[in-house]
Image (spheres, rainbow, N blue to C red):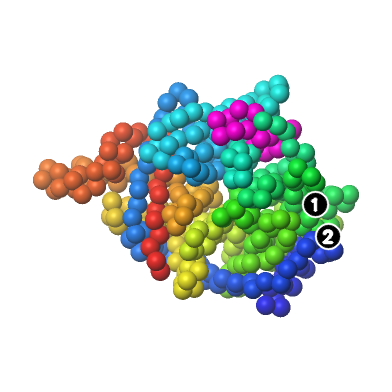
Amino acid sequence: MRKIILLSLIALLASCQDVKETNSSVKNIQLDINIDQELRLSEIADSVEVILLEQTDESDIARVERIIPYKNKYYVMNSIGFSNGRVYIFDKQGNFIQKIDKRGGGVGEYVDLQDIAINPQNDELIFMTQPQGIFKYDLDGNFISKVKGGYGMNVAADSLGNFYKTDRCFEETPYRLLMVNDKDSVPFGRIASDYFVMVNHYSFTNEFACHHGRVYHSYPYSDTIYDVTGGNHIPVFYIDYNGKNLPIDKIFSKDKNMEESGRIKAVYKDCFRTDIFQIADDYLYVGSVDGEKHGVISLYSFKTGRVFSAHRLIDDMFFPDNSFTFRPFRMPIAVEGNSLLWLVNPEWLLQGYEYYKENLSPEKWTEYCKRHPQMIEVCSKLDEESNPVLFKIKIKNF
């Protein structure tokens, strides 16, 4: 425990005088991972729902930055390049409902969209816009108001009516986090000046995770996950990579300039950092990345403490021996209850589908189609330019 607290405080926080700290039991989650690990889909999946996100002229998805399941809908943030941020809304069957695209210079419009969240207290969509800051819309995309606090990177909302954003750190504002509500704007999560470059240089796809109205956060390059609900700053999980944690002090120099030499690659290539995390009802999901851009997904059971990890997923439920290798931006990015939400490239599915269709006998192909009607229906509509396919993987008890 002492090691965890020291790592959290020394590596990230110069001072706790501006943070409300509470004693808590930090769970040390040991991930003994490597890039040779494989996992069969049937080992973790109780069932898999395959959802084709309908593609129309209004719902052509480039790259998904965020997907939020909320009240029988999926809110999908699409972005590639600058000034391309928009949100698509689908029902739970994947039928396209509408697009929210507020790019412009008028009231309630923005230059670019950085992140989205949902305020469960008032059923509001929260947009982190650039350069305007936080905008509130109703769930149909009608503008409500601008929230004080200015521009940031990531955004989240709790069930108490508070909004959270991440921000760049400078000498005059050495805080990574800002909590905003109708009454106040509170900076917290103070960062030591030696690490300004570290947190300013890189941002998660998802620095925040929300679960049952609470908000959790992890700093860039940190291995500690905090409960920040209500402006608290409570460490709850420490990700221990069993000797492969990133040695931050060896990468970032004291003169605050990020070293771009081969030494960084040499130090980083055999280490892992937490790239994304999500909290489900019964497990913690962690997506890790090493210096060579290898991705590893891990599931930690709250009930048993067991861990499943894999760099490569083998599909033994639909197209046996069809495998998928995880990399940044190609890992699951959300949870729904105890289901893992994973947006799959259509090319991967087509590879297995076309191989089976061509190589099975007519009798066996007919039998196969009867066993997997949902997958066959989805794959028969795909081509290489189709929208990603949503895998809703219900994780079995482990």
Instruction: Give coordinates of residue 156: x percent, y percent.
Output: 65, 47
- Residue that badge 1 annotates: 187
Q: Which mark is residue 214?
A: none
Residue 236 colored magenta?
A: no
Instruction: Give coordinates of residue 73: x percent, y percent.
Output: 47, 39
Amino acid on which the number 1 mark rests in the picture? Pro
Asked if residue 224 lies left or right of residue 363, the reply is right
- Residue that badge 2 annotates: 18
Q: Residue at x 74, y 37 (%)?
A: 147
Asked if residue 347 is positioned above or below residue 103 in the image, the reply reads below
Residue 131 colored magenta?
A: yes
Q: Residue at x 35, y 52 (%)?
A: 48
Q: In the rendered structure, which segment of residues is drawn in magenta?
A: 127-143
From mark 1 to mark 2, how far is it between C-alphas? 8 Å
Instruction: Give coordinates of residue 188: x percent, y percent.
Output: 78, 55
Secondary structure of the residue carrying numbered label 1: strand
Disc 1: CA contacts within 10 A as few (<14), some (14-19) or many (>=20): many
